[in-house]
Amino acid sequence: MKYKNKRRLIIGISLSLLLVFYLFKNLSESVRVFGFIFGVSVFYFIDKMFKIDFQFKHYIYTFIILSFGILFSPFYFLIESYDKILHFCLPIFGSFLVFYIIDKQKLILQWKPKRENRITSKRGILK
C-alpha cells in the first residue's frame, strides 16, 4: 500500500470513529476514542520515524489490538471471560509485529565460537 493511501486510511478511520463516538457525547467514550486515535498515531509515527515499513496487515493487527483493548473496554463488565480472551489473542497479534521487526534485522546465530577463536595446543583443542 502506498504511503499516501495508508495515511489517508488511518486518518479516515480515526476521524470516522471520532465522529461516531462524539455523537454519543459520553465522557468515557471520548476518552477511549482519543486513546485509540493516540495509539494509532503513535504506531504510525514509530513506523515512519524508524522506517520499519509495516505492511497493511500490521496496521490491521494494531487496529484489532487497540479496538478490542481500548474501544470495547466496557465488555470487561458485560462478558465474564472477555479478559481471558484478550490475554490470549492480543499477545499473538503483538508477537506478529515483533517478529516482523526482528525478521528484518540481519542477525547471525552462532552457537559455537569460530575455530579461529579457540586456543589450540599440541595435543588438540583446549576448552
Image (cartoon, grey):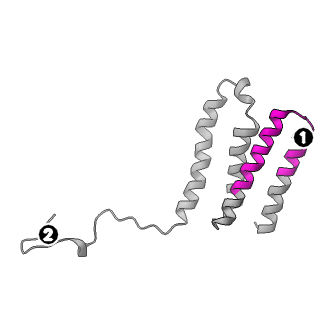
Q: Between 58 and 70, which is closer to the camera in this rendering?
A: 70
Secondary structure mostly seen in the magenta stretch: helix
Find disc 2 in the rendering and name its residue: 125
Q: Amino acid at mark 2?
A: Ile
The total of numbered circles placed on residues is 2
Q: Position of residue 72 (x, y in %)?
A: 75, 35
Q: Earlier in the sequence, mark 2 or mark 1?
A: 1
Question: From the viewer's perspective, is 57 left or right of 116?
Answer: right
Q: Position of residue 99 (x, y in %)?
A: 55, 56
Query: Pointers 2 and 1 in contact (CB under 8 A)?
Result: no
Q: Position of residue 112 (x, y in %)?
A: 28, 64
Residue placed at 82% from the left, 51% from the top? Answer: 14
Task: Residue 64: give its label.
Answer: none
Question: From the viewer's perspective, is 62 left or right of 113?
Answer: right
Q: Amino acid at mark 1?
A: Tyr
Residues drawn in magenta: 14-43
Find disc 1 in the rendering and name its residue: 22
Residue placed at 16% from the left, 63% from the top? Answer: 127
| Vertical position of residue 76 compared to residue 23: above or below | above
Q: Position of residue 113 (x, y in %)?
A: 28, 67
